[in-house]
Amino acid sequence: MDEEVKFILDSAKESMDASIAHLQKALTKIRAGKASPMMLSTVMVDYYGSQTPLSQVSNINTPDARTLSVQPWEKNLLGEIETAIMNANLGFNPMNNGDMIIINVPPLTEERRVQLTKQAKSEAEDAKVSIRSVRQDANKELKALDISEDLLSNAEVDVQELTNSYSQKVDTVLTAKEAEIMKV
């Protein structure tokens, strides 16, 4: 019986890890003033009739903290890439120099920083909801097992401790991201 309880706890821990990983990935897409190739991860380019991620048709680099450079593998894609970046509605104004596309990342306004902080909080709350959902599922699975009341209550306490620790991890990740966003 102990093996089944341990399996449920391990499974819950794995799912909560996945929630944290998803949160971190979502937060990397929220720009915090400095340029990152992840900012262009949602840009799709029309490549010979099919929508292809920008990263699959070019190299994306950050020459400095405020600039992104996009070097296409085929020169004839420059116009397509420029159009795709503008159509992605990211608030960037790409400049085509005939060789590559250069994007100056504008500094964030105070209003935009507050907006991005709210967006980060929303992502963190989604992660917490996901973690609580995992807790609920784990508790249901534990109750379905044919185990003693003592073992069940101990396992439920373990699940709750796991939930609390992962909620704290979410808060830690969020605090770090908020500090990054608000830093001028």
Image (cartoon, helix red, strand yellow):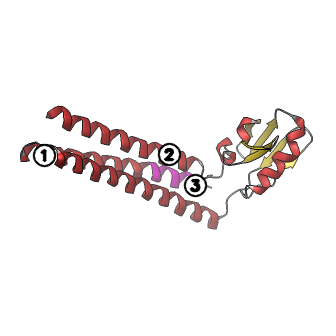
| Prevailing SS of the magenta stretch | helix
Q: Which residue is mark 1?
A: 152
| Distance (Cα) linking label 3 and label 1 | 43 Å
Mark 2 is surrounded, within 10 Å at the Cα level, by few (under 14), some (14 to 19) or many (20 or more) other residues, namely some
Is residue 176 rendered to the left or right of residue 160? right
First in sequence, mark 2 or 1: give its number.
2
Q: Nearer the viewer, mark 3 or mark 2?
A: 2
- Which numbered disc flags the more N-terminal residue, 3 or 2? 2
**Mark earlier in primary sequence (3, 1):** 1
Q: List x then y, in percent, for residue 91.
A: 73, 58
At mark 3, the secondary structure is: helix
Magenta-colored stretch includes residue 142: no
| Tags 3 and 1 touching, CB below 8 Å | no
Label 2 amino acid?
Gln
Q: Could you say where residue 24 lies in the image, as x and y percent from the top left? A: 50, 45
Q: Provide the residue designation for mark 3.
A: 181
Q: Name the residue rendered at 44%, 57% in the picture.
A: 126
Most distant residue in the front direction: 49
Q: Residue at x 7, y 44 (%)?
A: 148
The stretch of residues the image draws in magenta is 173-184
Q: What residue is shown at x 86% (from left), y 49% (from top)?
A: 95
- Identify the residue position indicated by label 2 in the image: 24
Image x and y of residue 131, in percent: 35, 51
CA gap between label 3 and label 2 equals: 14 Å
Q: Quadrant of the N terminus?
A: top left
> Residue 2, how many percent across, how many down?
15, 34
Secondary structure at numbered mark 2: helix
Q: Which mark is residue 141?
A: none
User: Does the residue at mark 2 contact the one at mark 1 (Cβ under 8 Å)?
Assistant: no
Picture quadrant where residue 113 is located:
bottom right
- Residue 181 is covered by the magenta coloring: yes
